[in-house]
Image (spheres, rainbow, N blue to C red):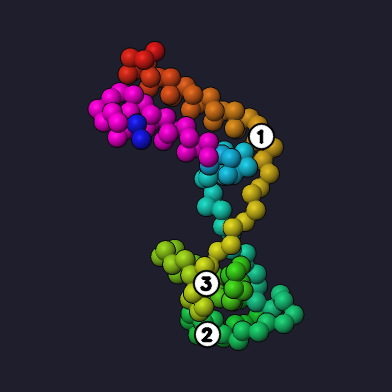
């Protein structure tokens, strides 16, 4: 809004930098439950198991490579749809940027619950101080401080 009213104003630049460097990170911090390092993790997790670990395995073969599952094969269930794949088959699929199950096209990964960090208060206060310090330097460079 400010940028529309004062397109060449240093105040406009300061407002944009403030929003980018303070409001967005603080929003992420609140969203992550106070864990400043949670944005480094993608928030998703595939759990691998050995085929045969479960008493009843319904799928007979991997839908990607069409090879039958054997005892001790490394497999994983997708969290949302529970389809079973060899880990070596589904990982390249996911790493190529596919966000859907190759079979049912449902969104592949379910978010993992945020982990509790003992240093939540310390990391969030460090984030606040870093952002404040950066913003003060920026205002000083613009001549406001």
Query: Quadrant of the rendered structure where residue 76 is?
Result: bottom right
Magenta-span inclusion, residue 124: no
Residue shown at 33% from the left, 14% from the top: 143
Considering the whole magenta stretch, tell me its main secondary structure: helix
Residue 145 on image: x %, y %: 39, 13
- How far is disc 3 from disc 2 in space, using C-alphas? 23 Å
Dot in front, 3 or 1: 3
Q: Mark 3 points at which residue?
A: 106
Frontmost residue, 34 versus 45 = 34
Residue shown at 61% from the left, 67% from the top: 79
Residue shown at 59% from the left, 73% from the top: 81
Magenta-span inclusion, residue 12: yes
The disc label shown at residue 119, or none = 1
What secondary structure is found at the residue carrying circle 1? Answer: loop
Q: What stretch is highlighted in magenta?
A: 3-27
Residue 12 on image: x %, y %: 33, 28
Query: Quadrant of the rendered structure where residue 128 is?
Result: top right
Q: In this view, does 46 lie to the left or right of 100?
A: right
Q: Mark 2 points at which residue?
A: 67
State which tag comes first along the sequence, 1 or 2.
2
Q: In this view, does 3 lie above or below 103?
A: above
Residue 45 on image: x %, y %: 58, 59
């Amino acid at each position: 809004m400010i940028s529309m009213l004062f397109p060449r104003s240093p105040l406009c630049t300061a407002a944009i930098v403030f929003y980018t460097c303070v409001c967005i990170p603080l929003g992420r911090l609140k969203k992550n439950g106070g864990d400043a390092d949670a944005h480094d993790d993608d928030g998703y997790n595939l759990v691998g198991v050995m085929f045969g670990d479960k008493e009843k395995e319904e799928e007979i073969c991997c839908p990607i490579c069409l090879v039958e599952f054997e005892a001790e094969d490394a497999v994983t269930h997708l969290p949302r749809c529970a389809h079973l794949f060899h880990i070596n088959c589904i990982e390249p699929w996911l790493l190529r940027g596919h966000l859907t199950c190759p079979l049912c096209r449902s969104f592949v990964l379910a978010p993992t619950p945020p982990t509790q960090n003992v240093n939540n208060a310390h990391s969030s206060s460090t984030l606040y101080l870093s952002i404040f310090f950066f913003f003060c330097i920026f205002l000083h460079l613009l001549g406001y401080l």
